[in-house]
Amino acid sequence: MKEACRSIGARIIEEPERLIIYGIGGKINPKKKVIDALGSGLVFRVMTALTCHSTAPAVISGDVVLRTRAMEPLLNALIQLGGNISSVHMNGKAPFINWGGYSGGICEIEGNISSQFITAILFAAPLARKSTTIKIIEKTLSLSYIRQTLETLTIAGIKFQQNENLSQITVFPGQYNSAEYTITGDYTSCSYLVAAATLFPCDLTLKNINSKSLQGEQAILTFVDEMGMDIIRNYKRNEIRLINKKKQLTGNYEFNVSDCPNIVPTLAALGIYVAGCFRVTGGSITRFHKSPRIEAMVNELLKLGVNIRPLFINGVYDGLEIYGASSYAGNCILSSWGDHRIFMSLFVASLRCQQANYIDGYEDVHCSFPDFFKEFEQLGITFQEVIPQHGK
């Protein structure tokens, strides 16, 4: 995201523990012919919307995986708002070429594919000449992300109106105001540590975790609390203490993840060690993520010998059902499916295996949780990087 912001003219000074950002006053003039989002869907979608205000043509692209992901609903919505934008390969997917033209108005967009589409339009809307009204059709999933976006707009002084269920939002033209913003820990990243703490007796304190955050993935704490974890929140210090006295997880659980889909793989990794029926539902949106995450976790956990099956709604992967065990043999070769969250979840799933597993894709972890391995080393987990031999 930093490099993408620089590519449209922002100046960013990086200091220990903070960034100082000098904005561009709403005047977007790309410094590069191609804005490369690499593997980030959020960067791609936000930059696609923002460059609809560009004073010069801009090409927005990304890596091989990103160029296969759903983008057409955002493309169509931006065109409704006056954007002169098209898919280079005429297939509704990246790369896009953007000639500007966003003037405002009314657009309709699906809410059941990616909340990032709505976030992207919300960030671009204040720069338009006219107000922008977003009508979200179909059931809106991942509402917490939209609420976080609106919270950010409020901090920046942007005015908007919304209805109760966020199916319609109107954003008025305005100038973003500078402000100081404290970024606390990401609950999806936190979920891997929480899951690990749930698998073993422990007393673990997580720092820089805001208990009042709007992040939907904060639900991981509600879920493990139901499973018997003692949770002590220190609101002043932004700390959460986890105390687990259980050696074995037992019971029957069902968790709906429609507002916290990023922790579906984490819950799958946790559920394989629950002696009972462990069900996760409401995760259909994850088929549009970096990999089809329910399908990926089911396939990889079957390799470990887990009693797991996918759950479907209208022929679509929606969740999973697991009958867990206390341990598994391990010594398996597991695939991350090119997805950082699948890798980290399979890492957690391997913690109680009797033998080590080989998991590919460790390098992808750096895109979302650079300190992942460092944090687990501090917990006493041993692992090593393995260089595959040619042909194996």
Image (spheres, grey):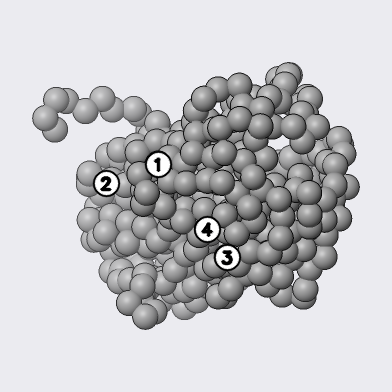
Q: CA distance from mark 3 to mark 2?
A: 37 Å
Q: Residue 190: in sight, yes or no?
A: no
Q: Of the residues shown, which amino acid type is indicated by label 2?
A: Leu
From the viewer's perspective, tell me whether residue 359 is left or right of residue 176.
Answer: left
Task: Provide the secondary structure element on which disc 4 rests.
Answer: helix
Per the image, the residue denoted by label 4 is 76
Q: Of the residues shown, which amino acid type is indicated by label 1?
A: Val
214 over 251 or under it: above or below: above
374 over 295 or under it: above or below: above
Q: CA distance from mark 4 to mark 3?
A: 8 Å
Q: Quadrant of residue 230?
A: bottom right
Q: CA distance from mark 2 to mark 4?
A: 38 Å
Q: CA distance from mark 1 to mark 4?
A: 14 Å
Front residue of 121/329: it is 121
From the viewer's perspective, tell me whether residue 158 is left or right of residue 251.
Answer: right
Q: Residue 62: in sight, yes or no?
A: yes
Percent position of residue 180, x then y:
85, 35
Q: Of the residues shown, which amino acid type is indicated by label 4?
A: Asn
Q: Residue at x 77, y 73 (%)?
A: 163
9 over 262 or under it: above or below: above
| Residue 334, disc | 2
Per the image, the residue denoted by label 1 is 88
Per the image, the residue denoted by label 3 is 109
Task: Provide the secondary structure element on which disc 2 rests.
Answer: strand
Packing grade of label 4 (10 A; few <14, some 14-19, many >=20) is some
Q: Are marks 1 and 3 in contact (CB under 8 Å)?
A: no
Front residue of 218/82: it is 82
Q: Earlier in the sequence, mark 2 or mark 4?
A: 4
